[in-house]
Image (cartoon, grey):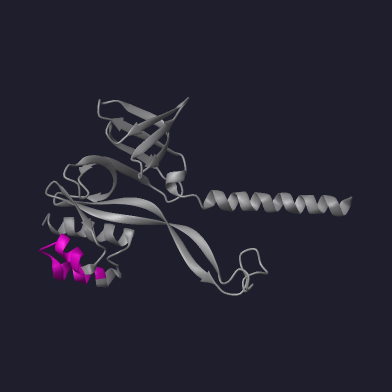
Amino acid sequence: MKTMKKALLSLSLLFLVVVGAFAQNQFPSQMWHKGNIYTTDGQVYGGEIKYDLESNVVQLQDQTVDTFTSSNVTYFELFDEVYGGVRKFFSLPYANGNDYATPIFFEVLTEGDQLALLCREYVTTDSRGMGGYGMMGGYGMNPFYGPQSMMSNKLAFKYYFLKNGRIEPYSLKKKDLFDMLPGHDDELSLFMRKNRLDYDKRGDLLRITAYYNELNQN
């Protein structure tokens, strides 16, 4: 009986560890956050918020769960406990290759008098080969299965610049970054080298854009 109790206790602890790991691996859009929703008719709704940028909807959980679309929301803000800090998402008209613009949600990373850096997050699948054993062990090189692969999801971002009232997508190429931020190539290059900033990382792009806006205030 003691052996069985120890085994059950071990299984229970393992279950809690696995559940905790899954909870920590949730993406921001899969979690509820404290925040507010500001609608186009001037109303403000506060509570727990969950957003879906792919569908351009935001849900509010208070006593019930209400769903708002990007068509009737001006913006919403939330406190992200996992990644830290307050995040703001605005509903902005965007054509996206179509003949007419429709409102969709963009997160505003930084803004100034000249331009704003926007982004839209999404979850992508990453696959890579697994040498040796598979995730469950023992069949990684089994000839009946062939080479095994591990699938994992990761958070990715698409970036945009709001300039002169237009939203322009950014290709994550260094040349295009300087095209988007004209007039201060030498200052930006020095700033990036000095601070070891990349042109395709979220935090680095935020700092570069904020610095560019500062340069244009002088």
- Identity of the residue furthest to the right in this view: 1
From this view, report whether residue 189 is shown above or below residue 23: below
Please give the name of the residue rendered at 39% of the width and 31% of the height, measured from the top-left corner.
67
Residue 167 counted in the magenta span: no
Magenta-highlighted stretch: main secondary structure? Answer: helix
The quarter of the picture where the C terminus appears is bottom left
Q: Is residue 173 above or below residue 53?
A: below
Q: Give left or right: position of 103 versus 130.
A: left
Asked if the stretch drawn in magenta spans residue 190, the answer is yes
Magenta stretch in the rendered image: 175-192
Residue 169 at x, y percent in the picture: 22, 55
**Where residue 47 appears, x then y in whole percent?**
42, 31
Q: Answer left or right for 218 relative to 27.
A: left
**Image position of 115 with respect to 134: above or below:** above
- Give the image quarter of residue 126: bottom left
Image side of residue 82 versus residue 163, left or right: right
Above/below status of 63 relative to 128? above
For the point 23% across and 68% down, which residue is it?
174
The percent coordinates of residue 127 (x first, y second) are 47, 65
Q: Nearer the viewer, residue 94 or 204?
A: 94
List the single residue furthest toward the front: 144
Q: Quadrant of residue 194?
A: bottom left
Q: How many marks?
A: 0
Q: Position of residue 154 (x, y in %)?
A: 44, 58
| Quarter holding residue 171 | bottom left
Which of 93/163 is in front?
93
